[in-house]
Amino acid sequence: MDTNPSDIALAELEQAINYWRNLRPSRGEERSLSPEVNRLAEVYALMIYERLHSLPLARIGADALALIEAWRSQRV
């Protein structure tokens, strides 16, 4: 799915979350999320709560933005 490069679509965010889940799977008996997945899940929750199909990257914190950029760079 191609969107404006200054936005992230909900489907793209799901792909980024899955990418980080594969790199940093849940751990421990409680199967807690990795910090990377947890941070992206916060962005996902915001989008669901606000019923957004896409979100400007300018609204995303620096740590989550770095995770998204890392994911985007690996899929080129």
Image: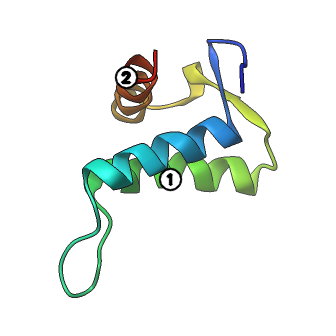
Quarter location, residue 5: top right
The location of residue 37, given as percent across then percent down, is 38, 53
Q: Is residue 44 above or below residue 10?
A: below
Q: Is residue 18 above or below residue 27?
A: above
Frontmost residue, 23 versus 61: 23
Q: Is residue 11 above or below residue 46?
A: above
The location of residue 55, given as percent across then percent down, is 68, 30
Instruction: Tell which tag, 1 or 2, sits nearer the viewer.
Output: 2
The location of residue 70, given as percent across then percent down, is 35, 25
Q: Is residue 24 left or right of residue 59?
A: left
Instruction: Quickly name the residue at label 1.
Output: 42
Q: Amino acid at mark 1?
A: Glu
Quarter location, residue 59: top right
Q: Amino acid at mark 2?
A: Gln
Mark 1 lies on a secondary structure that is helix
Instruction: Quickly name the residue at label 2.
Output: 74
At horizontal 36% and vertical 55% (from top left) the residue drawn is 21
Question: How many labels were placed on the picture?
Answer: 2
Frontmost residue, 22 versus 36: 22
Q: Earlier in the sequence, mark 1 or mark 2?
A: 1
Q: Is residue 49 left or right of residue 61?
A: right
At horizontal 39% and vertical 17% (from top left) the residue drawn is 73
At horizontal 40% and vertical 35% (from top left) the residue drawn is 64
At horizontal 68% and vertical 41% (from top left) the residue drawn is 11
Mark 2 lies on a secondary structure that is helix
Looking at this view, name the residue that lies furthest to the front: 76
Looking at this view, name the residue that lies furthest to the left: 28
Quarter location, residue 67: top left
The N terminus: image quadrant = top right
Q: Residues within 10 Å of mark 2 (few under 14, many from 20)?
A: few
The location of residue 50, given as percent across then percent down, is 77, 49
